[in-house]
Amino acid sequence: MKKRWLAVLLILVMCAGLAACEGKKKKEEGGSDGVETLSLLMYTDWYKDGWKALENYINENADSLGFKLEISTIQGGDQGDQIIATKFASDDLPDLIQVYKPLWMEARCGGNDKLVDLSELSSVSEYDEEVLKATYYYDGKLCGMPIDTVTYANAVFYNKEVFEEYSIKEPETWEEFVDICKFFKDETDMTPLFYSGSDVWTLQMNACTSLFNDAAEKGQDIAGLMGDINTNKLKYSDNQLLINAAERSKQMITDGYVQESFMSDTFDNAQEAIVDKTAAMFINGTWFTDNISAKFPEEAENIGVFILPAEKGESYVDMYVPYTLCVTAGAKNVDTAKKAVEWITSQEAQQIYADAQPGIYLNKNVSSELIPAVKELKDIADSGRVMANWLESNLYSFGNFGVYLADYYTGNYTEAAQITQEMDDETGRNAEAAGDSNWK
Amino acid sequence: MRRKEKIRRKILAVSLWILSLSILIPLYFAVINSLKDKKEAAMMNLKLPTVWQGAENYVRMAEEGNILQSFVNSCVMTILSVLIIVICSSTMAFILERRGDKLARVLNIFIMIGLVLPVQIIPTYFICNALDISKRAAYICVMAATNLSLCTFLYTGYFKSIPVEIDESACLDGAGPLTMFLKIIFPLTKPVTVTVIIISFMSVWNDFGVSVYFLNNVNLQTLPLTVYNFFGNHNSDWQLVFANVVTATLPVLILYLFLQRYIIDGMVAGSVKS
Amino acid sequence: MYVDKGYKRLKKRRYPYWLAVPGITFFVLFFIIPSVMGLILSLFNMNGYDFSKAVFIGIENYKNAFVLPTMRRAIINSFIFSAVTTFFKVAFGLMLAVMLNQKLKSSNLLRTVFFSPAVVNSIAVGLIFKSLMHPGKGLIDTVLNSVNLEFLAKNWLGDPSLAIYSVSFIEIWKWSGFTMVIFLSGMQAVSSDYYEAAKIDGADGWQKFKYITFPLILPSFNNALIINLVGGLKVFDLVQATTQGGPGTATEVFSTLMYKSFGSGRFGEGCAVAILLSVIIAVFAIPTYAFIEKREVIQ
């Protein structure tokens, strides 16, 4: 009988051995012919025309470049964030990974020490050092290089043909903006203002930039204000203009300026609504024009834009810096991975990326043909009316601003102040869980 | 009396067919919209397409969604997982049911816990990583483990209905335990085995919660994951999304159609208690 | 005494435990150990998933989980979802089974049709219904509007007070046929002798159901009830595919909440929510099962 037990044990050991070998084999694959396959992980939304073009180029020229790419994508959102965090926690890392920002990495995954310092790459000199310092360095280490475009947000997009037809002028103040909405509601059967609540992140655009005005009122810029919040010197609830903005954006729904099905419509629907002229205006960033350029290239020139007017004070362009491309410590061959990033962020590669996906790139030597709406936003930003977005500048997650707004729009929260209260509570929970002494 | 009965049955059949429309319409909706062009699919109605664009949609979807590879992945991983489930749950159920001693009872309760507890996905991920097995192997093992409880439960019910005398006669012929099980007992379990195959096949093929962790890679992803990812990229190209939905559903539907006449027989045995 | 011992030895030889070892190994390695690990981790504060920085904090995670603002919602929603879907799945399943257990020409085909939603994956089902339930454009509202029932046309998944019921409806649509098959299997096992006898006594359809069919299929009823109850409390895929817990937090259930805790890096708390879910399921499922099992009759 003992023999039988032994046999079973042996089979189990063999199974385990085989499985382990398969795992090992995978890791050692490639490299024999001088071309290494590098795995790259990113969110599905980020795998756009730029990456597709660059990936094609790389895989066609793998012999001369010395590497190939194997890109994996996962859906973003809470679950996607969690998968990334789990991967970092269990050291199960791809060679390259594209993430938001080093600050986000540190806050969500505690993962920056699992990233390789890139400050020696030759392509670094092609970028503005100040910009890299502000975002891509963390604790004196260059955790990653910028990838993709700068995004300008807080913009209201419209179809120029529609504004021309009704001879409407771009509004300067909030009251003028409301008047335009009222005009569309009363005089046309178009939806004055389109909300796409099914893609919750788009709701954030309706209100988040008012925090800039809060900062300005306190005589600070947004970095200073977020610094105070990150050290518990200031609460989100102390920013009355942000709360007011949430209220105003809900008022648009109450007044019937927003389509009734706004919680079921997607970002994609919003693009179609503007192109089809079933909706007059949509608040978003240059993600919107990127998508229009990709899906309706002939309509791209027709998209007009103005900055969403603030309640009082200046209205700013909301700037999102590009995402971060990192080399992980789990890379099979760190040197190859670094070389790959060096090439990907160089002028040559970035130009390929930019040709497929026009936009604003941080690489100083890249030129890109901008469509009028993006150009207009860039000009405003270059004139100084710009602040960096704050939604990713928090040290501790405040939850999902879009979800809170949806809760408020649909009546789960009765007061706009509950949004900021919830943000403060969630920040506190995460800060305490991380053992931050400022919250004790 | 007979005529009355006949009419009653007719009415019953007709009303059941009307009721079945509630099932058929959504399924028809998915199929028909996968054959339309973008504009018509966006209208989301049940009309026949004016332009039949099925082939084009399916080809485009297959290219962009990496469907072929995913199909192979789904097949390989589901079949291996189901194989493990059938082998493990049948042997386990047989031994535990026949032994019936204290240890067997404790182990049985232990396994039944699996019917109730949800999968602890994050710790599972850590364990698999610590074991250093490949993602595919990990997925197969985890899916096998999570389905073991239900399948063992079904087998246990069935073995109760197989008289012990059959084992005895087999043993008198001098067969060892393994031979007895494989040659005599296992062939008798055909109905319940088919049920187990269908149920575990459905569950592994359609899994989302586990595969999203282990198989989030183009080369590893399964068909249901392509649906999830594809919708993220093309959420207004409904014709492509539905083409993807149909492709992901068809294999398991076909399997079910082939085996469906056994499924009730297998469950009959599984649910009867002596 | 001697016979008993001999029988035991015979059993040992005929049914050796090593045959069960592969199954037990899989189960322990990939199910029990992770569950135990989850239980242990729920007692620790894990700073950013780093095991080396884990601090034992006792039941603090559970306390925190309970005061989460979305927790109350998730509990209520999970119970609503579980109760509504179990009730209707069992009711429809039983009704369909009774109807299809009669000899109809097309009963086999009909069974196949009613069961078929169960084989479609939840993500696909979610997407199909997401488009059917779209306010204004979706088929459901379009039909209602065209037959002058505008007041019934709703924002099915976008209205926070309605959304959880809409998701429940989808779940019922998907699994009623499966429940039907469980009942049918129970009914097939009922000997026709009982019905013959009842016929002689002049029992009508309802009496036959009440006094023969139902008591005899109680084991199936019990299985169906428990499977659906547990499935309802555990639901994740379908909610993720249709509303992702939204609009806002209106359809947050246990599993989505768990993912949110994990997602924001509060790992121990996520484990605590998962354990709470297990406990709640056990508290409801086991006594219910035992209660009905006591009333089962043996044929």
Image (spheres, rainbow, N blue to C red):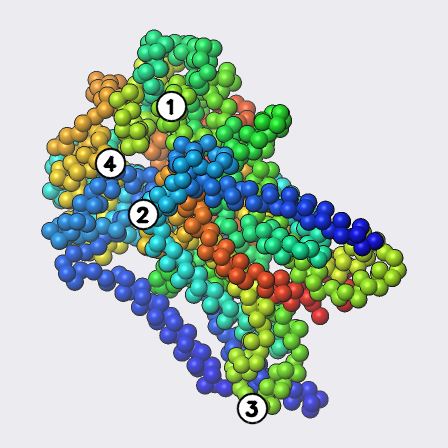
**Badge 1 amino acid:** Asp
Q: Do the residues labelled 1 and 4 touch (CB within 8 Å)?
A: no
Residue at the spot of label 4? A148
**Badge 2 amino acid:** Glu
Chain to which the residue tagged by mark 1 belongs: A
Q: Residues within 10 Å of mark 2 (few under 14, many from 20)?
A: few
Residues indicated by labels 1 and 2 sit on the same polypeptide chain: no
Mark closer to the chain start, 1 or 4: 4
From this viewpoint, is residue A77 visible? no
Using the image, tell me which numbered label, if any, was put on residue A276.
Answer: 1
Residues indicated by labels 3 and 2 sit on the same polypeptide chain: yes
Residues indicated by labels 1 and 4 sit on the same polypeptide chain: yes
Q: Looking at the image, is mark 3 or mark 4 nearer the viewer? A: 3
**Badge 4 amino acid:** Asp
Residue at the spot of label 2? B63
Distance (Cα) linking label 1 and label 4 = 28 Å
Q: Nearer the viewer, residue B31 or A297?
A: B31
The secondary element bearing badge 1 is classed as helix
**Badge 3 amino acid:** Gly
Left or right: where C291 falls relative to A340: right
Left or right: where B11 falls relative to A380: right
The secondary element bearing badge 2 is classed as helix
What percent of the width, then of the height, locates residue C169?
60, 41
Chain to which the residue tagged by mark 2 belongs: B
The secondary element bearing badge 3 is classed as loop
Mark closer to the chain start, 3 or 2: 2
Q: Name the residue at 38% across, 20% down.
A: A277
Q: Looking at the image, is mark 4 or mark 2 nearer the viewer? A: 2
Using the image, tell me which numbered label, if any, was put on residue B174.
Answer: 3
